[in-house]
Image (tube, rainbow, N blue to C red):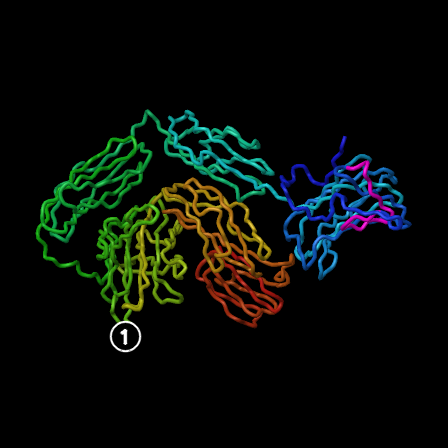
Amino acid sequence: MKKILSVLSAFCVAFTLTAQTELLENPGFEEATSSPLFGAQFEGWGVPTGSQIETTDVHSGEQALKVNSNSPTENNNIDQEIGSAVTPVFVPGNTYRISIWYKVLTPQTGGDVKLASYWNSSRDGELAHDSQILKTDFFTASEWTEKVIETTCPEGATSFYFRLQVAKKAVVLFDDFSIQKVETAEPSLQILPTSLPKVQANINTSVDFEALTIHQSNLTAPVTITIMGTDAAFFSSSVTQATAAEQEVIFTYTPTAVGRHTAMVAFEVAGHSELNLTMRLEGTCIDPTLTPTITLTPTEVPEFTAEAEQSSTFHLTLNSANCLDDIAAQITHVEGEAFVVNAALYPKNMECNVDITFRPSQAGNYHSKLVFSTTNATSVTLDLTGVATEGSGENPELTTEFNWDISNPTTLLNENFENIQHNQMQVIENWQNVVRQWQRPWWGYEHLDADSNIVERSAKATSYKYQTSNPDGIVGEMWLVTPALDYKNAAGKTFTFRVMGDFMFEDHDTNLELYYIDVQGGVPYMQKIEAGIPKTPDLNKEWSEIHMDLTNQSETIADVFFMAFKYIGLMGEDNAVTYYIDDVSWGRTDLPKLMADSAQIVMTASPGVEQYSTAITISGNNLTQDIKISVGGANKSNFELSQTSLPSAGGSFTVKFKSNNEGVHEAYIKIASRGAADIYIPMAVLCKTTTGLKNETVDMDIRYIDNGLQITADGMQGYEVYDVIGRKYDGRATNAESVHIPLTNKGVYIIKVKTEYGTSSRKFVVQ
């Protein structure tokens, strides 16, 4: 019976050896000559004096090597050098399998054969790499036995020196040696089907999703199944781990609350984050005893009248109860097109203001139907009629003065600019569109959303004018001011908006600024707020969601206040910088929210070698759209995301880093979903060939003192300060040992300090 000895763990790695190239010369000792003076000589091998050709007791083939060790030295060597700097055969990073068949005929106290091999460099000589594997203690076996080891070719190796040592007076047979490259079978994970249809259940009952199957191969750990998200408690899985090549899994939906519920399932394998998969679970829970209702007050709308090119607005109240989804409003035009409504969706199960505007383009009669609908509810239809008379043809005059009327503040604002006219002056009830300098107000703007293929509308500010020079440097200044906002009585205390810049260039002077305004004795008090409005060209055409939580600030926020967007920029053909505003809200309690389990990513890597982050998990509340993930910053080309989107229920992703250049590589991850404040996760990777870090010697102290950063470092030569998304805040060369940098905003900062001893980067959080 043959006995197999191996220094490999049986579950360490799955491999296959199929028709691989043999790297040893004469591995089976079949090519040999014999002489009375020198004994047997084997082609390609160095063998001890007195070695013999064995033809009777062989492992395979016609002959084997017989070593009869009578040398006066303690050990006798069997050796061969494979490869050279001129004819390389090994590839750094590849793994090679060494196999030795042997049989001890005359043992010597159990210590008969040992390995004494090594990797060799033409420049550095013997390398210590894998020496604990390649140089073994003595081993023995009285039957034909295979000794197997695996070693990885290190950087700089030009050859491999294979050597066996045989103990003095031991008689040993050798046959069928081998050195071959290991072909590792690729691990795989597949989930079929790739998505599951939605299910519906009555409250406090269960329903199963259709079964899915996990297909896996060559994995070193089981597949773990984790259900995540705010609604995870309503979902369960038939198994939590899968180890079989094919494993059926059934998910169950058991809701205890009426509504739509979503969760994210993560299929993860330890050590193989690149294979991790996610799947969305969606269920709808209804209570058959509760009927969804939609109510309008008043129930009818009187006939509208207006001049052509002018408008008339009617206000009503919408209430809903027991609804699963928000209330959709859709207008169907029967005769002419002149009616618009202030929103396409209204929040469910709460009181909402509905503004119907009659805006005819020419004289005549108009008729439309406005339908309010939601899932499982009886729709409500309004007949809208209007008569338009000939107008004066004059456009609305520009407003140049503010009106600080605080007599009727609103507790809920949710303006999505759906009623604007493309490239015409913004005219929205209770909003102010004020031109302080030049003759350009805020305009309406329409564009086709690339993801949803839906026409989106927003407010637009620009001072660009075609073929108009501006030798005098005239600056345009335009304000868009919200209605008066009620701080004291608002249910929610968060002010939100979306903003996007376009045609921005480095160091441009155009600004979009946000102002808080309250009125005391009829006199406005204005304070500019640093809200993180985009300024740099890498953010062109990219929407940013900004949320400002004003909770517990009653001592600094007036009971009634305004928020205002101020655009200021050089007018004419030389300045195309444009800003867009959308989804301005105040007082909402159903705001979407994103959450990440990682505040930063810090890694070390070697040049040219891929490095993966741990899994980053994203979850959210009240999300209505998928989650978008992107990379930005100075070194973004060195980072790659495992996926660029997640469903609204959340999920996980990883980051791959690779660079051929040494140094600190910085970038950031942006997490975004429509209506939720963006999340930025800074990333820093030290890419270095050695394990030591130069900047460990930099003695640096950072403190927040007197509304600024106090940086102290021995031998300082300069510093740079960046915000969390990689924009440079401050920086200069200096010989001072301590510098103070005033800060206007709290948040996360990256500080890079250069000293005579090296360079160091630190993250500092100002709270």
Is 344 in the magenta?
A: no
Mark 1 Cα shell of 10 Å, populated few (<14), some (14-19), many (≥20): few
- What residue is at 67 percent from the left and 57 percent from the top? 87
Q: How many marks?
A: 1
Image coords of residue 547 (percent x, y): 38, 51
Quarter holding residue 384: top left
Residue range of the region highlighted in magenta in the rendering: 40-58
Image coords of residue 202 (percent x, y): 37, 26
Quarter holding residue 58: top right
Image coords of residue 749 (percent x, y): 49, 58
Dominant SS in magenta: loop
| Nearer the observer, 346 or 67 | 67
**Direction from residue 304 to residue 563 in the image, left or right:** right
Image coords of residue 303 (percent x, y): 12, 42
Q: Mark 1 sits on what residue?
A: 472
**Direction from residue 64 to residue 159 in the image, left or right:** left
Callout 1: helix, strand or loop?
loop
Indicate the quadrant containing the N terminus: top left, top right, bottom left or bottom right. Answer: top right
Is 57 in the magenta?
A: yes
- In this view, which residue lies farthest toward the bottom? 471
Which residue type does callout 1 highlight?
Answer: Asp
